[in-house]
Image (cartoon, coloured by chain):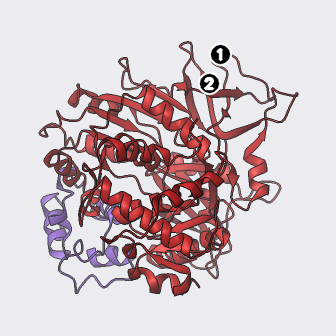
Amino acid sequence: MKSIAEILKEIRPEFDFTTSQDFISDGMLDSFDIVTLVSSLDKNFSVSIPGTEILPENFQNIQTIEALLRKSGAAT
Amino acid sequence: MQINAIDYFEKGALLRCRDKVAVIDTAGQYTFAQLERFAKNLAALLIKRGDFIRRPVPVFLPKSMGNIVANVGILYSGNAYANLDIKSPVQRVKGMLDNLAPKVIVTSAAHIAALAALGYEREKLLFVEDAMVDETLYENAALLKRLDRLIDTDPYCIIHTSGSTGIPKGVGLNHRSTIDFIDWSFDTLNLSGNEVMASLAPIYFDAYTLEFWMMLSKGSTWVVVPDACATFPAKLVEFITKNPINFIFWVPTIMVNIANQDLLTNADLSRITKVFFIGEVFPTKHLNYWRRHLPQATFVNLYGPIEIVVACTYYIVDREFSDDERIPVGFPMRNTEIIILNDENKAAKLNEPGEVCVRGSSLALGYWNNHERTGKGFVQNPLNPHHPEMIYRTGDSGFWNERGEVMLLGRKDFQIKHLGYRIELGEIEHAVLQIPGFKNACVVYNHEKKEIVLFYETEKEQTAGFIREKLGPIIPKYMMPTVFTWMEQMPRNPNGKIDRAQLVARVNESK
């Protein structure tokens, strides 16, 4: 199983996701990336992130993505 | 008789509502009077660079008031605007620019370095901010008089579309074809000028053309939806609820996402009276969701490839459809004929599938500097042996139903629509084969899951991150494969070619 950091690195190899605290404001994830990210997280953690949770505040950094996964029922 | 599209502005918003707000972008709002001054200033600055006319002038700017000033200004200079995607990989933008061989590029100082990297130095650039000033830099009568040199078949704009050889094709559209479409849309779609548009269409798409002239002619207000809202459907719904938006013209992908997340149930969208969509099939189930939540709105399906100005058929949704029924693309527009040709190049009968072909003034001029490709898409009408007459073969298959409506079936080739973007799978394959060590590549689209599936042949399996990193500088984001499948050896058919059919079957089985 891949970690969240590894998945992010695969989607945008040019960025260092461990240093930013706000991926959205820092322009590291655009609408295409969010679509890819949600489907990768779903597959990798065997969850189905509800559409209503696809909000900027849930994709700010690795901690908020972790919290989102836990809320969606993943065993992280 | 109207010869130049710019007359819509001179005789439209400039006469009727000069002081109304034309554009709202993230930086502020601007009236039509301001737009006139900025755009004519830009035209004057452009003409100072050389007395050229009928030339493509690329615009390298984000979607904003600046790009509107550039487009209107270029039209006042008698040239054709070519809006580029500033987020597209540099190699791809360079291919488009080199093909256009521009004398001047309209941009802003913020992009000097990006354009220098493509080989376009400072002296080729004109900064839009130099035109967006309080002073008047033009002489109105001389500027308008200069436009008498144009005729209605001269180029109006150039829009780029994916090309299977790896280089995008520049579709040239003329003034006549634009006027032909715009006049029809004003007469048929009940547009009043009171529209406040939440614009999501990229400026290098043709849907933009309709919004552009609704603003300039009718005096509608063009509101640029901020990027951050476009990323999150919930934010987008919030944006159109909080602003006085009453008109949307979007691609179905985003509307399907909103429906899937059930975001309309708690949103008050009673202001919205028109919902137009274009670019791909709107699944009926999701369209029905929108219709249930916006019972007051008129829904219009527009269909047409970029080779025809905006659209060639339309369907105003006027009856109920069950979720499993397909909605028609509808009726040909005024002064346009749709011909469905069967395999024998004869007119198809009722319900008989064939290729959708278009005849009319709204056809494009062809592909810029590409006579070979132009000759393949734009061909002599096989039903007319008497005189030269072009039709455009769309590559879409479809049929006539009993109501006299055109129904679409799908593609005849390897072109897809993904997130509303038109993509040649060959362009992605071409890009993959540029990565050292990649011997073969085949890209298949999973229509069910909306995934771009790449099969590739290398000695050792590569990570998705590695491939994305290599493809990033070559293809735009929306073309990026979403599933990566390594193969030691591609399946082959008896004549040695990659067995695409087998890979397609494999993708479809994975549902």
At 56% from the left and 26% from the top, the residue drawn is B334
Horizontal and vertical percent position of residue B179: 54, 39
Element on which disc 2 rests: strand
Mark 1 is on which residue type? Leu
Q: How many marks?
A: 2
Q: Which residue is mark 1?
A: B350
At 65% from the left and 74% from the top, the residue drawn is B98
Residue B127 left/right relative to B371 = left
Residue B186 left/right relative to B296 = right
Give chain B's shade.
red
Residue B278 left/right relative to B366 = left
Which chain is mark 2 on? B
Decide if residue B85 is in sight here: no
Decide if residue B445 is in sight here: yes
Label 2 in the same subunit as label 1? yes
Element on which disc 1 rests: loop
Is mark 2 in CB contact (under 8 Å) with mark 1? yes
The letter of the purple chain is A
Depicted B438 relative to depicted B165: above or below: below
At 33% from the left and 73% from the top, the residue drawn is A7
**Which mark is on residue B474?**
none
- The 10 Å Cα crowd at callout 2, few under 14, some 14 to 19, many 20 or more, is many
Depicted B32 relative to depicted B362: above or below: below
- The 10 Å Cα crowd at callout 1, few under 14, some 14 to 19, many 20 or more, is few
Horizontal and vertical percent position of residue B419: 43, 52
Depicted B463 relative to depicted B356: above or below: below
Q: Which residue is mark 2?
A: B399
Horizontal and vertical percent position of residue B284: 38, 30
